Amino acid sequence: MKDAARLLVYLLATVLVGALLAPCLFWAAQSLVAHGLLPFLAGYDFETFFHRALLIAAVILLWPLIRSLSIRDRNDLQLATNPRWRRDLLAGFVFSAIPLLCCGAILLASPIFSLRGAINWPAFSKVIAASLTVPIIEEIFFRGLVLGALLKTRQRYMSIFVTSALYSIVHFLKAPERTSEHVTWTSGFNSIAHAFVQFTDPVLVAAGFTTLFLMGWILADARLQTRSLWLPIGLHAGWIFSSGVFNKIARRELITLPWLGKNLLVGIVPLAVACLTWLVMRGWLKYVDARHT
């Protein structure tokens, strides 16, 4: 329980430092733009800098957290070397990307979405970059460090529950754009307050929080089944890639909450697709385990 308490302190400290750092980042960017440097920064609102400030705070405070948890190597996190990491990485990507892309193809044949008249092909490089970097960073943190530390309590399902809830909350709690038109030292805390407003809307909770929670549980299960992060990294990358590609080629025509949210990763329909991915992953793991026994 001490490790869980340390994680809670770390998360609270990350939010506090991020909220205080965000205005500094915003004002620094505005100063650069005013001096004719990096003019593209003018297109980002405060919420963008707030999210980046949280990431910076998480990185800065990560080393003290690792020291406090007495983590020396991967064994302390219940992780092991995976000699078949390429197979698991590819399998995870296929299991998550193909069902979601098939779902997207069906939606394009419905009145809900239509193909964009002009596709911004250079934007696909951002999708690829996100698919390569975000899963590694988030899986190391959530399924590697956080879940590993909680597993030291020897409460397997509670550890998965807490990690999945945290993963969902971090992704679900996002303040609306342009929340802080006039940036002050308290703007970061204002963003946090507006982010929690989403929990008052049961439709948004059903469409967003629940789906993200299930995905977090699937990723945690993949990590525990393989004692490795490669399968969850592959799953995570497949979801980001397929959702990103669909967003670049498709345009929403109808609002269908809670069935579908702002992208293919939010809503009851993605929830069902994620369940299918989970079943396929579990079946595949049983098959490969049987072959090696």
Image: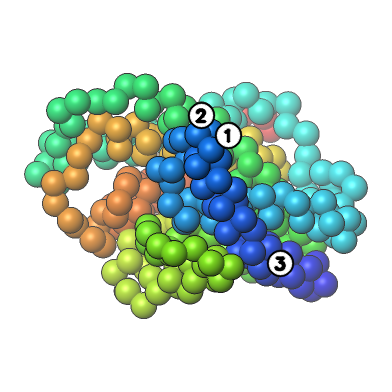
- Provide the residue designation for mark 1: 133
Marks 3 and 2 close (CB-CB < 8 Å) = no
Instruction: Residue 197: give x, y in percent of width and height.
Output: 40, 74
Colouring scheme applied when the structure was drawn: rainbow
On screen, residue 139 versus residue 268, left or right, reads right
Q: Say if 195 sits above or below 263 in the image.
A: below
Q: Quadrant of residue 3?
A: bottom right
Q: Nearer the viewer, residue 230 or 66?
A: 66
Q: Quadrant of the N terminus?
A: bottom right
Q: Quadrant of the C terminus?
A: top right
Three-letter residue code for mark 3: Ala
- Provide the residue designation for mark 3: 13
Between the C-alphas of marks 3 and 2, the distance is 29 Å
Say which element carries label 1: helix
Assess disc 1: are there few (<14), some (14-19) or many (≥20) residues with their C-alpha within 10 Å of its C-alpha.
few
Say which element carries label 3: helix
- Provide the residue designation for mark 2: 129
Say which element carries label 2: helix
Residue 231 seen anywhere in this rendered image of the structure:
no
Between the C-alphas of marks 3 and 1, the distance is 24 Å
